[in-house]
């Protein structure tokens, strides 16, 4: 499982797959493909390739369930959202991260626990950037 303090960089494809798994829990490639293919237009083999690569990167766990591989996310929804929120708030909206987190909470997009985890992750990332002298996003 990726370190809680090291926020993963996720491609849109990886985020789409994680969203399907966060919504429905552990699933086979076929089950995920049936959800994401409507918006991505991917072939089944593309979904399988992306999911296998995500497993190799430590983003997904893959286990054999009676001859069918079942995948589950190894990162939480807030971990997946943290870098996207930081980028979007800093570069696109040019506003404070806490305002966006509050909007997500107010809209019911995140549970109280997810908001708490997302806030902690972003604070950890800010502290890490301060320690290394990096510019915050």
Image (cartoon, rainbow, N blue to C red):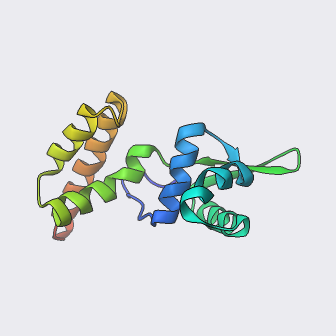
Q: In the figure, is residue 67 to the left or right of 108?
A: right
- State the count of labels: 0
- Residue at image point 65% right, 42% down: 26
Viewer can see residue 4? no
Q: Nearer the viewer, residue 102 or 74?
A: 102
Q: Is residue 101 above or below residue 6?
A: above
Q: Residue 38: give x, y in percent of width and height.
A: 59, 56
Q: In the figure, is residue 95 to the left or right of 68?
A: left
Q: Residue 73: give x, y in percent of width and height.
A: 57, 48
Outermost residue on the right side: it is 67
Q: Is residue 22 above or below residue 129?
A: above
Q: Residue 93: give x, y in percent of width and height.
A: 16, 59
Q: Is residue 14 above or below residue 108?
A: below
Q: Residue 53: give x, y in percent of width and height.
A: 62, 67
Q: Quadrant of the C terminus?
A: bottom left
Viewer can see residue 87? yes
- Residue at image point 29% right, 35% down: 116
- Residue at image point 12% right, 51% down: 96
- Residue at image point 36% right, 30% down: 111
> Which corner quadrant of the image does residue 135 belong to?
bottom left
Outermost residue on the top side: it is 112
Q: Nearer the viewer, residue 100 or 137?
A: 100
């Amino acid at each position: 499982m990726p370190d809680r303090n090291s926020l993963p960089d996720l491609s849109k494809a990886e985020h789409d797959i994680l969203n399907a798994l966060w919504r429905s829990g552990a699933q086979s490639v076929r089950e995920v493909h049936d959800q994401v293919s409507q918006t991505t237009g991917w072939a089944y083999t593309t979904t399988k390739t992306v999911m296998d690569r995500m497993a190799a990167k430590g983003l997904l766990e893959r286990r054999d369930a009676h001859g069918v591989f079942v995948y589950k996310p190894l990162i939480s929804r807030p971990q997946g959202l943290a870098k996207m929120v930081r980028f979007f708030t800093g570069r696109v909206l040019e506003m404070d991260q806490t305002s966006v987190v509050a909007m997500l909470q107010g809209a019911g997009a995140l549970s109280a626990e997810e908001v708490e985890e997302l806030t902690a992750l972003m604070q950890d990332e800010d502290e890490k950037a301060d320690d290394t002298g990096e510019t915050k996003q």
